[in-house]
Amino acid sequence: SQTIHQWPATLVQPVGSPLSLECTVEGTSNPNLYWYRQAAGRGLQLLFYSVGIGQISSEVPQNLSASRPQDRQFILSSKKLLLSDSGFYLCAWSSIHVENYGYTFGSGTRLTVV
Amino acid sequence: DAKTTQPTSMDCAEGRAANLPCNHSTISGNEYVYWYRQIHSQGPQYIIHGLKNNETNEMASLIITEDRKSSTLILPHATLRDTAVYYCIVRPLIQGAQKLVFGQGTRLTINP
């Protein structure tokens, strides 16, 4: 069966520090991968998505970047964190096959920038 | 993605059926209706989806009106663990990145 792993679960980082959040998927190949952010009390915002290795699409301009160095690995990064980067970050995957319709989300990383 | 309109919040008594409405009056012919829910501090969870026929699975039932302009998610016997934010999303079933755009959803509270 397919599983998605996301870590760490919580993170407290000072302003100006770098960030690296990792997400890996097991049990499937060539998944579509996504990064979402949810600010406190707000809705889910799609940040990046990827349809293949090295292929990254950005949905909103921001202080973050994403990379997909391997088929089932998706990384969210920042060189210098801002206070506004605080939030709940969620990785998700979906199948490239049209008939497999659902998104599966990871358990999320709660980032607090101080 | 077509826009959806959901009530901000709803309450339901434990053991009763919870009926969550969603309006999607601008839905296109190739767009499906999806429902997800997000329990506090967790990632969203897929519940069900449908095109025009009513659908049922182990979690819920989805009733789509004949004109497809609205739908209702039914949790037949709500439990306290069903307390969550429920999102109704419409999008086409196509290949490629299947971006899901989440609205504000309905905050459902199940009361003992």
Image (cartoon, grey):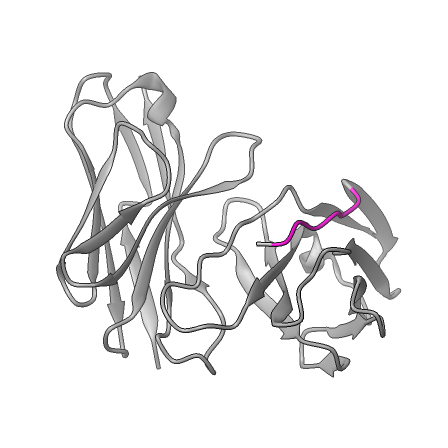
Q: Position of residue A42 (x, y in %)?
A: 56, 33
**Residue plotted at (18% across, 17% down):** A16
Q: Position of residue B32 (x, y in %)?
A: 63, 70
Magenta includes B5?
Answer: yes
Out of A17 and B49, give the one closest to the viewer. B49
Q: Quadrant of residue B35?
A: bottom right
- From this view, report whether residue B4 is shown above or below residue B97: above
Q: Quadrant of residue A34?
A: bottom left
**Residue plotted at (80% across, 44% down):** B7
Q: Position of residue B87 (x, y in %)?
A: 64, 53
Is A11 on the left-hand or right-hand side of B93? left
Counting the numbered discs, the total is 0
- From this view, report whether residue B10 is shown above or below residue A74: above
Quadrant where the image shows the N terminus of chain B: bottom right
- As drawn, the residue found furthest toward the left would be A69
Is B92 on the left-hand or right-hand side of B5? left
Magenta includes B27?
Answer: no
Is A56 on the left-hand or right-hand side of A111? left
The span shown in magenta is B2-7
**Residue plotted at (70% across, 51% down):** B4
- From this view, report whether residue B69 is shown above or below residue A27: above
Q: Position of residue B12 (x, y in %)?
A: 86, 53
Classified by dominant secondary structure, the portion drawn in magenta counts as loop
Q: Quadrant of residue A97?
A: bottom left
